[in-house]
Amino acid sequence: MNERDPTKDERKPANAFEAHAQTVIQVVITAILLWVGNAVLNVRDSTIRLEASSAQSRDDVKDIKAELAALRTQILGATAAGLSAQVQIKELEGRVGKIEGAPRK
């Protein structure tokens, strides 16, 4: 009754050294997998922080563009007002020149 079934795959290490070597290899492989997993998590966290920073930078750029557009509009308005004022000054200078240059009666 204690016959062994030849279909069963019962592998036993040849000696104690082989068993210890297999245990050491398993520990090393587990440590490497843990290290790689930790590195992947660190990269994921860094990527998330970078994406958040990038989104904030895009928002800042949009705000700066809006401010520049407003400043450009103000500059164009001030330039037009300055040109209009220069035209009015020339006209007034011409009128004053006519009045001063007119003969007195």
Image (cartoon, helix red, strand yellow):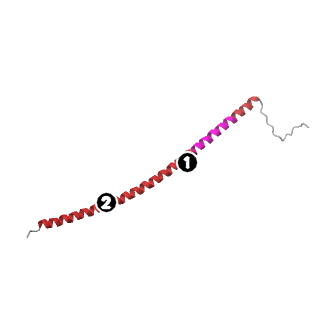
Residue drawn 55% across and 48% down?
48
Q: Which residue is mark 2?
A: 78
Q: Quadrant of the N terminus?
A: top right
Residue stretch rendered in magenta on the structure:
26-44
Q: Which mark is residue 64?
A: none
Which residue is found at the position 42% from the left and 57% from the top? 66
The circle on residue 48 is 1
The picture quadrant where one finds residue 88 is bottom left
Q: Give the mark nearest the N terminus, 2 or 1.
A: 1
Residue type at the position of mark 2: Ala
- Is residue 36 inside the magenta stretch? yes
**Relative to 36, is 67 above or below?**
below
The image shows a total of numbered marks equal to: 2
Q: Picture coordinates of residue 75 (x, y %)?
A: 33, 58
Residue type, label 1:
Ile
Q: Looking at the image, is 51 positioned above or below residue 18?
A: below
- Distance from the alpha carbon under mark 2 to that under mark 1: 45 Å
Residue at the outermost right position: 1
Along the viewing direction, whichever of 13 and 73 lies nearer the viewer: 73
Identify the secondary structure beneath mark 1: helix
Please give the name of the residue rendered at 21% of the width and 64% of the height, measured from the top-left corner: 90
